[in-house]
Amino acid sequence: MMARKDKIVTDLTGGIAFLFKKNKIEHIAGTGTIESATAVRVTPDKGDVQTLKTKNILIATGSDSAPLPGVDVDEKQIVSSTGALSFTKVPKHLVVVGAGYIGLEMASVWGRLGAQITCVEFLNRITPGMDGEVAKNFQRILKKQGMEFRLKTKVTGAKKTKTSVTLTVEPAAGGEAEEIKCDAVLVAIGRRPYTDGLGLETVGIETDERGFIKIDDQFATSVPGIYAVGDCVPGPMLAHKAEDEGVVCAEILAGQSGHINYDAIPGIVYTWPEVASVGKTEEALKEAGVDYKIGKFPFTANSRARANNTTDGFVKILADAETDAILGAHIIGPDAGGLIHEIVTVIEFGGAAEDVARVCHGHPTLNEAVKEAALAVDDRPIHI
């Protein structure tokens, strides 16, 4: 399995290298430091240091795993998401610190391969920011799969031996400490911008209190001629968001017009089952005082899901109570990451729940659950 994974990664990155060559893009492997708005010093992996003169600079350095005080990552027994992709054997007991997207994705993989999984989360719920109803059902499904959750709990230290790790944990609100012994620990408490050694301070590029590079609606930093996109700027830390920003920024630099609708960027958790969302959550709509309607449809009533024995989860659509415009959608279930894009498209074009409800959907498909949820917004689903 690992050999296949490594081959796929090599093939995909090799494909990018081919595209660079095809499009006459020079690729220099090394460490870059911005010296001015028109110069980048590069310390290559091989060869001499050189300075590149340029008209514009686009920073797209991504993010790095956030550290946890008292727990030193060695990428062998105590790992970040990078090390969690490269275990040489299945841990008997894996403790995941952080119940967000990345932590649960890795927990889902190794749990399905036979590891005992314990998730330790500082907050009182998993996947902060996810629609509350979906998160609650998500935790219930994962618990049914065998995952143990220790919520409102913080990790204060870790001790390693050659074969095990012992974590010290205590209640988040304070209280008596206890120990959890395991084979491996995954630290997945979030990510931070990767800008170490980039020279932001030298040229005067402004960052916020969390270290993200400040940009305007044209991706320009506080220094004229320098732009930034992706995980190192505010917003969802998602590969597809970064890709779209890079494309649009390049279009702007080429004198074209570009635009991104941040309300139409999907978020996907690649567990089993998958979880996907776009737009607003119920909690956000309530906080904003928006009057909305809900349409839900369970996969237990979907023919394809029943035939495939993948009936956990549901589709949930939130629409404006007056205009019927779709404000958000949340799916937990089989291929949620694929199904969400129907709603993404409708939101991008300013569509309504009725627009989805009136589109003919093939049978038997999982997509029919999306149509039924859209029908349920108007309280007229067919199959429940």
Image (cartoon, helix red, strand yellow):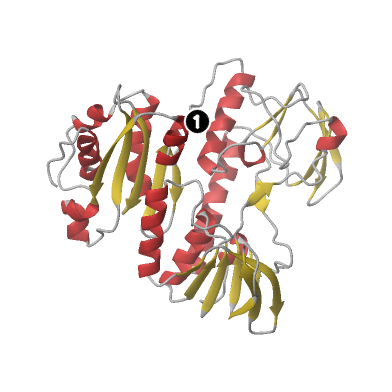
Taking the image as shown, residue 61 lies to the left or right of residue 151, namely right
Q: Position of residue 5 (x, y in %)?
A: 50, 62
Q: Is residue 91 visible?
A: no
Please give the name of the residue rendered at 71% of the width and 42% of the height, measured from the top-left corner: 210
Seen from the viewer's position, the closer of residues 255 and 27 is 255
Secondary structure, mark 1, is helix
Taking the image as shown, residue 252 lies to the left or right of residue 260, namely right
Around disc 1, counting alpha carbons within 10 Å, would you say few (fewer than 14), some (14 to 19), or many (20 or more)? few
Residue 157 lies in quadrant: bottom right
Q: Work out whether 140 lies above or below 194.
A: below
Please give the name of the residue rendered at 63% of the width and 34% of the height, measured from the top-left corner: 229
Taking the image as shown, residue 242 lies to the left or right of residue 161, namely left
User: Residue under circle 1?
Assistant: 262
Q: Position of residue 118 (x, y in %)?
A: 51, 71
Residue 84 lies in quadrant: bottom right
Q: Is residue 18 visible?
A: yes
Which amino acid lies under the numbered mark 1 shown in the image of this protein?
A: Tyr
Q: Position of residue 226 (x, y in %)?
A: 74, 27
